[in-house]
Image (cartoon, helix red, strand yellow):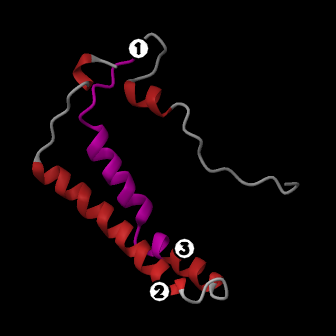
Amino acid sequence: MLKENEMIIFKGAELLDVMKEINYILISLHKIGSYYALTLPNSYEAYAKETTDFIDDKNVTQRLAYVRRILSEKFDTSLGDDDMDDIERYLEDLEYWSPKDVND
């Protein structure tokens, strides 16, 4: 890790924006889950649709991208000997969603 990335300072307002977005998403998803919890698994389709609609209608991916931008823009993104910056290197082994094999 670059020395410049060992300590990063944020303004309180920046972190409050991050907290607001995270809380909105987390608490809303919790409320959706709690609402349908008593009737699951019978209400699974309604639960799944409500969750998907929330993600789509409330721009959850854009909100998360905004949070990621706030958190990552302070990093020094100089490339190392491996042609990656510190963030890329740290996230390199993260396994992302992929479609399930239909033969599983």
Q: Amino acid at mark 3?
A: Thr
Residue 71 on the magenta segment: yes
- Which SS does the magenta portion mostly show? helix
Q: Which residues are magenta?
A: 54-79
Q: Is residue 52 above or below residue 89?
A: below
Which of pointers 3 and 1 lies earlier in the amino acid sequence?
3
Residue 11: x and y in percent read 11, 45
Q: Is residue 86 above or below residue 32?
A: above
* Tag shown at residue 52: 3
Residue at coordinates 57% horizontally, 81% vertically from top-left?
A: 47
Q: Find disc 1 in the rendering and name its residue.
A: 80
Q: Is residue 36 above or below residue 89?
A: below
Relative placement, left or right, of 93 versus 8 is right
Which quadrant of the figure contains the N terminus? top left
Q: Amino acid at mark 1?
A: Gly
Residue at coordinates 47% horizontally, 70% vertically from top-left?
A: 55
Residue 74: x and y in percent read 23, 34
Q: Find disc 2 in the rendering and name its residue.
A: 35
- Tag 2 and tag 3, C-beta contact below 8 Å: no
Q: Amino acid at mark 2?
A: Tyr
* Cα–Cα span, label 2 and label 3: 15 Å
Q: Nearer the viewer, mark 2 or mark 1?
A: 2
* Cα–Cα span, label 3 and label 1: 39 Å
Element assignment for label 3: helix
